[in-house]
């Protein structure tokens, strides 16, 4: 009987500690979904850009190690270009948002009022 109770208590402690560990990692799930949403299209773009060039290099007859090195260099360069574009977006988007909000706040409040054209009040 004691062995049975001991086994149940050990199982309960294991399940409790496992749930505690998994619960503490729960904040990583949104980050994982974000990386998956951004990373997979980025990998597809890199594959579309690099695979045809690697095939051409292999068909020309370059040694395999040279093809892999050139392909890696091209992938690195493409990744650098993409990261610079994302950096530019990180800088430009807040500026654009601030300008948009300022314009929205300072626009005239009488949207429906129409101005009379010059010379129309003489009639």
Image (tube, rainbow, N blue to C red):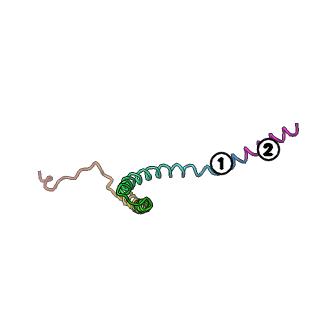
Residue 112 placed where, x, y %?
A: 28, 48
Question: Residue under circle 2?
Answer: 10
Q: Residue at x 13, y 55 (%)?
A: 119
Query: Is 2 situated above or below 77?
Result: above
Q: Residue at x 84, y 42 (%)?
A: 6
Residue 10 on the magenta span: yes
Residue 29 or residue 64, whichever sits in front: 64
The image's mark for residue 23 is 1
**Residue 90, can we see it?**
no
- Furthest toward the left, the residue is 123
User: Where are the magenta residues, as a range?
Assistant: 1-16
Q: Element type at marker 2? A: helix
Residue 55 placed where, x, y %?
A: 38, 53
| Structural crowding at the residue carrying mark 1, measured as other residues with C-alpha within 10 Å and reported as few (<14), some (14–19) or many (≥20) | few
Q: Nearer the viewer, mark 1 or mark 2?
A: 2
Considering the whole magenta stretch, tell me its main secondary structure: helix
């Amino acid at each position: 009987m004691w062995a049975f109770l001991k086994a149940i208590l050990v199982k309960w402690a294991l399940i409790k500690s496992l749930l505690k560990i998994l619960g503490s990692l729960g904040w990583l799930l949104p980050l994982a979904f974000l990386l998956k949403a951004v990373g997979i299209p980025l990998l597809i773009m890199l594959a579309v850009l690099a695979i045809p060039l690697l095939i051409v290099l292999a068909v020309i007859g370059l040694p395999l190690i040279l093809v892999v090195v050139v392909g890696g260099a091209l992938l690195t360069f493409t990744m650098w270009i993409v990261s610079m574009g994302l950096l530019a977006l990180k800088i430009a988007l807040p500026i654009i948002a601030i300008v948009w909000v300022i314009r929205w706040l300072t626009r005239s409040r009488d949207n429906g009022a129409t101005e009379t054209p010059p010379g129309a009040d003489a009639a």
